[in-house]
Amino acid sequence: MTTTNRIFAVALLFTSACDDVTSEDPLDTHHHGLTTTLVLYFTPTGGGETLSFTWADPEDDGNPIIDDIFLPDGSDHNHHDAMSYTLDVEVWNELEDPITDVTPEIESLDTEHQVFFTGSAVMGPATGANTDAIIEQAYADSDANGLPLGLTNTITTRDWGDGELTVTLRHLPPENGQDVKTEGLANDVALTGFGSIGGDNDIQATFPIEVE
């Protein structure tokens, strides 16, 4: 994928990199690289054109390029019909030469990462019940321990309207020999926010989204 093929979203809170993480084992040390770009791919589950939406700060200067998300529903008349999409997430570092797809690194360290989907537009594991939601998110992948990862998801439109979709890639390395990524983290976020879980954000971006 080239950096020119982007249809992208708005307003973000961006954390450029995780700190070095050192456990009691000197061999268990991982430096997490810079992440400058987030790409979302929505593919209709019944077939059709893939829509891509990107947030990018290729200069890492705090002035990102952000695309709006527009998702068609399944309607061809005057009432809403649900539409289902497969949502794939990619993460890039555009400060590398050549630019680097960080997604394989996340996949190889899947037990230390999870993507969370929150915001006024969303109903899902990290938001709980949200009667105003226009989309519903469900995890469609898992890590080596069977816990949610979030690089692949199912998105279903719930109604016409607009709102915000916040995508957060969280780095969750072990601390003091204990796993930080555990079952139910999305529910913890839904109940009390990101301050209730461990780790740090690799990237967090808030997209305006409209179902039309």
Image (cartoon, rainbow, N blue to C red):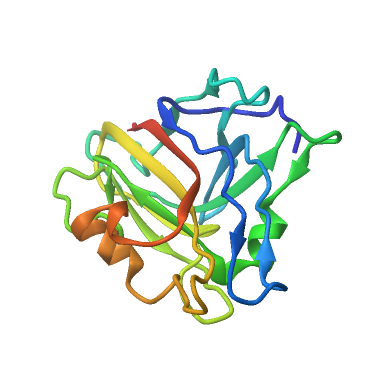
**Location of residue 154 in the rendering, given as x and y in whole percent from the top left corner:** 44, 58
Outermost residue toward the left? 131
Residue 148 vertical position relative to residue 156 in the rendered view, above or below: below
Residue located at (51% from left, 23% from top): 66
Locate residue 118, reporting x and y percent: 32, 48
Which quadrant does the C terminus fall into? Answer: top left
Query: What residue sits 59% from the left and 79% below the top?
Result: 144
Question: How far across and down, in percent of the image, does residue 181 sit?
Answer: 45, 71
Is 95 left, or right, of 147 in this rendering?
right
Q: Quadrant of residue 79?
A: top left
Q: Is residue 123 left or right of residue 109?
A: left
| Left or right of 178 in this view: 111 | right
Q: Is residue 49 above or below residue 85?
A: above
In the rendered view, tell whether residue 10 sits above or below residue 87. above
- Which one is nearer the viewer's eye here, 146 or 123? 146
Q: Position of residue 141 (x, y in %)?
A: 52, 69
Front position in the image: 71 or 167:
167
Give the tally of numbered discs: 0
Using residue 155 as the reference point, say whether residue 6 is left or right of it.
Answer: right
Q: Residue at x 59, y 75 (%)?
A: 24
Res 29 quadrant in image: bottom right
- The structure residue drawn at horizontal position 72% and vertical position 29%, both measured from the top left corner, is 3
Q: Quadrant of residue 75?
A: top left
Query: Which residue of the protein is positioned furthest toward the right in this rendering?
Result: 98
Quadrant location of the N terminus?
Answer: top right
